[in-house]
Image (spheres, coloured by chain):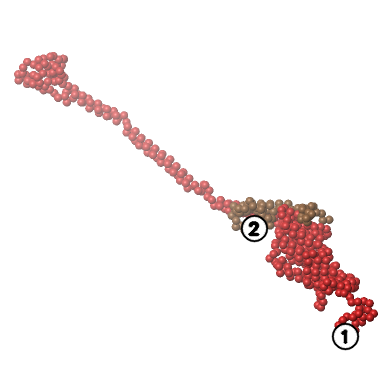
């Protein structure tokens, strides 16, 4: 031991060479290297339990951190290769068990552990980590009830994110087929172990970003039961965020009834098992069909009832509607009556007329005419007798002559005769011409008979 | 009662709900005869549409295939056995 012979409590000004001392003072590098070799040989494989603090991921991909407990702290480093294999998101506060070797960092008089693997220190620590993450994401509102969407009633296409092998996908497909055959697109992923969280998140994001005919209208993230470790991928932040951000309604069916992952909290609906997820996803087609048929039958019954009721009403109304006979009866009767009266009236008039005619005809006898004729003839005879007796030429038979002018016209005075000069004397048996000589003597005038009046 | 034409645009659930409304309206007996016939016709169309939609439902199981870039490049038939 190099310092063993140093005299106790005695320190000179100069470090002198000592007798029998074949080894001089060590340089800092020498001692550091000695120490390094010593530490690396003595602690080439250690497991340290401690809480991560001062966690930092460098751009190079290496992780820098410290492990601590109540009284001590030890720096640690995890190279890029090992860091990529980490099964959890290392962060401050997580209690871990780190496996690796101790080494020193002579440049800073430090020792540290080069971590090869790092695991969470037991279930309690895991749960503590889970609670922490849960609180953080809950604070962001990822689990809030307002974010939950209703599932589509009858999805046309269901996207399933799960392992392509194993019971889970078979259970889901069987139950879907039983209830309502539906188009299913499986996005195969690892559901356990390293890289599983990233694959699940990528699948959820992939469905969410899908466009066109293949885009599902419901997504199921499913995994069978397992230990908290097995299910850990579904607690990873990347999965939880992908599920919460999914643009399609999403069911989480991870693990069994009692297992709850953060993925379950972030999904719109949590199903206790994959089979239950299939039940929530689709209604029972047979029930729907039966319901439809019932609805159809009900509607038909209603319409028939309507028709019956309407027919009944129509019947009632029809019955109350008066018949043409009753409606037109009075008028018809009046027409009949009038017709009758018209006939009677006419015959009456005819009878009257006939009576009158008969009466008139009765008066119209030949006697009426002959009587009148006889009467007329009597009067005519009488008149004719008078007329005959008054014919001026009759007196000529008794010796009288009538004086006329030669030119015609009776001369009834002497003056006229004188004025006329030439006269005609008309006798009963003819006429002779005469001439006036002078005024006649008186007695001649006396003898001359008076001209009788014709009537 | 005018959207006779956009019946096909309804989702199954909407169509089903509409059918139920129509049946309820018919059963209430409040509709006039004319309206009841219109309603019934509409109900029939909805029922037929819903039934067709259900009968069309068929299982088709596919699997996403991923391209070289990790993006989905299509689907292939999937047999879970």
Answer yes or no: do the residues labelled 1 and 2 have beta carbons within 8 Å? no
- Characterize the local packing of mark 1: few (<14), some (14-19) or many (20 or more) Cα atoms within 10 angstroms: few
> Where is residue A179 shown, x and y percent of the image?
76, 57
Query: For residue A108, which quarter of the picture?
Result: bottom right
- The residue wearing badge 2 is B21
What hue does chain A carry in this figure? red
Q: Is residue A395 above or below residue A28?
A: above
Q: To which chain does the residue with label 2 belong? A: B
Residue ID at (61%, 57%)? B29
Q: Quadrant of the C terminus of chain A?
A: top left
- Characterize the local packing of mark 2: few (<14), some (14-19) or many (20 or more) Cα atoms within 10 angstroms: some
Query: For residue B79, which quarter of the picture?
Result: bottom right
The reply to whether residue A135 is visible in this rendering is yes
> Where is residue A406 shown, x and y percent of the image?
14, 17
Q: Is residue A87 above or below residue A299?
A: below
Q: Give the SS element for disc 2.
A: helix
Residue ID at (74%, 57%)? A207
Relative to A402, B24 lies left or right = right
Between A265 and A100, which is closer to the camera in this rendering? Answer: A100
* Chain coloured brown in the rendered structure: B
The reply to whether residue A219 is visible in this rendering is no
Q: Which mark's residue is nearer the viewer, 1 or 2?
A: 1
Q: Quadrant of the N terminus of chain A?
A: bottom right
Residue pushed farthest right?
A20
Query: For residue A70, which quarter of the picture?
Result: bottom right
Between A11 and A265, which is closer to the camera in this rendering? Answer: A11
Residue A9, disc: 1
Relative to A316, A131 lies left or right = right
Q: Marks 1 and 2, how far apart in space?
A: 104 Å
Q: To which chain does the residue with label 1 belong? A: A
């Amino acid at each position: 031991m190099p310092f063993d012979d140093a005299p106790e409590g005695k320190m000179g000004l100069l470090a002198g060479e000592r007798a029998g001392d074949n080894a001089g003072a060590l340089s800092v590098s020498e001692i550091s290297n000695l120490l390094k070799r010593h530490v690396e040989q003595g602690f080439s494989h250690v497991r340290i339990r401690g809480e991560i603090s001062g966690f930092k991921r460098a751009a190079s991909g290496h992780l820098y951190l410290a492990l601590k407990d109540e009284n001590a702290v030890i720096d640690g480093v995890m190279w890029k290769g090992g860091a990529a294999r980490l099964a959890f998101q290392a962060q401050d506060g997580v209690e871990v068990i780190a496996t690796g070797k101790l080494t020193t960092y002579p440049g800073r008089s430090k020792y540290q552990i080069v971590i090869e693997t790092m695991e969470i220190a037991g279930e309690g620590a895991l749960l503590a980590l889970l609670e922490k993450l849960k609180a953080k994401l809950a604070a962001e509102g990822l689990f809030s009830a307002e974010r939950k969407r209703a599932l589509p009633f009858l999805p046309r296409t269901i996207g399933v994110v799960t392992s392509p092998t194993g019971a889970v996908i078979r259970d889901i497909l069987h139950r879907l087929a039983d209830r309502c055959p539906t188009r299913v697109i499986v996005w195969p992923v690892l559901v356990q172990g390293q890289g599983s969280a990233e694959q699940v998140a990528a699948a959820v994001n992939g469905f969410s970003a899908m466009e066109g005919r293949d885009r599902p209208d419901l997504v199921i993230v499913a995994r069978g039961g397992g230990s908290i470790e097995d299910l850990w991928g579904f607690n990873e932040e990347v999965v939880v965020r992908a599920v919460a951000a999914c643009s399609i309604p999403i069911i989480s069916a991870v693990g069994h009834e009692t297992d709850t992952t953060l993925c379950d909290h972030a999904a719109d609906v949590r199903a206790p098992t994959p089979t239950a997820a299939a039940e929530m996803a689709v209604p029972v087609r047979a029930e729907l069909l039966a319901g439809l048929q019932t609805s159809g039958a009900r509607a038909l019954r209603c319409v028939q009832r309507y028709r019956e009721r309407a027919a009944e009403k129509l019947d009632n109304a029809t019955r109350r509607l008066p018949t043409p006979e009753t409606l037109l009866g009075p008028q018809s009767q009046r027409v009949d009556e009038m017709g009758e009266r018209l006939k009677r009236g006419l015959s009456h008039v005819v009878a009257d007329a006939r009576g009158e005619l008969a009466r008139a005809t009765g008066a119209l006898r030949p006697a009426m005419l002959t009587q009148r004729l006889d009467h007329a003839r009597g009067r005519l005879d009488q008149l004719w007798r008078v007329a005959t007796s008054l014919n001026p030429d009759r007196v000529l038979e008794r010796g009288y002559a009538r004086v006329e002018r030669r030119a015609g016209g009776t001369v009834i005075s002497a003056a006229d005769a004188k004025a006329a000069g030439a006269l005609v004397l008309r006798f009963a048996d003819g006429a002779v011409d005469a001439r006036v000589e002078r005024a006649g003597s008186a007695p001649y005038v006396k003898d001359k008979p008076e001209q009788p009046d014709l009537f | 009662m005018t959207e006779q034409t956009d019946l096909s645009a309804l989702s199954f659930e909407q169509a089903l709900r509409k059918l139920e409304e129509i049946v309820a309206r018919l059963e209430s007996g409040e509709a006039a005869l004319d309206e009841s016939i219109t309603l019934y016709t509409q109900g029939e169309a909805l029922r037929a549409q819903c039934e067709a939609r259900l009968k069309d439902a068929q299982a088709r199981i596919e699997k996403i295939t991923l391209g070289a870039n990790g993006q989905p490049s299509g689907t292939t038939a999937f047999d879970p056995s």
